[in-house]
Image: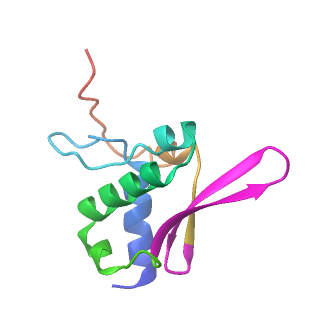
Amino acid sequence: MDASTIRDMVNHWLSTPPNGYFGQGYGSDTRSLLLRELSANSADQLLAQLRQQIPILNQLNDDQLSIHEEISGFDTKRIYLSIGNIDILLDDNTNDTNTNQDYYDIRAQ
C-alpha cells in the first residue's frame, strides 16, 4: 500500500461524519476538535479513533502519525494531521468535501 492510498483512506475518514454509515461508528468529528482548544488529550483521542477505524495506521509510531498546529498571521491557527511526511489540513469544511455519499444521522427525529 502506498502513501497516496493511505492519504485517501484518511481523507475519506475525515470527510465522513461520525456514524455516517448505518450501524457503524466509522467517521470523525473534526469540527468538535477544532471548536475547542487543542490539547494533547483531544488530539490523542482523535488519533486513537483513527487508529481503531483504519487499522493499517497501527503500524505507524507516534512520530509518523501525529497532530500539530501552525500559527499563521495574527489570528489564524492551522491544525494538521501528519502521516509520515504528508500533512493533511484539518479545517471546518472537512465534513463538507464529499457529497456523493449517503449519510444517516442516528440522532435524527
Residue at the outermost top position: 109
Q: Residue furthest bottom?
A: 2
Q: Main secondary structure of the magenta part?
A: strand
Q: Is residue 55 left or right of residue 4?
A: left
Pick the front one: 104 or 39 = 39
Question: x, y (%) of residue 101?
Answer: 34, 45
Give x and y (percent) for residue 77.
Answer: 70, 50
Residue beneath the point at 23% across and 43% down: 21
Q: Nearer the viewer, residue 49 or 26?
A: 49
* Image position of 78 (left or right of 38): right
Q: Residue furthest right?
A: 74
Q: Which quadrant of the structure image shows residue 102?
A: top left
Q: Which residues are magenta?
A: 65-86
Figure quadrant of the N terminus: bottom left
Image position, residue 64 (x, y; %) = 45, 78
Say whether residue 66 is magenta: yes
Q: Extreme left residue here? A: 23
Vertical side of 13 occupied by 33: above or below: above
Seen from the viewer's position, the closer of residues 44 and 76 is 44
Residue 91 counted in the magenta span: no
Please tell me which residue lies in front, 71 or 23.
71
Q: How is the image coloured?
A: rainbow
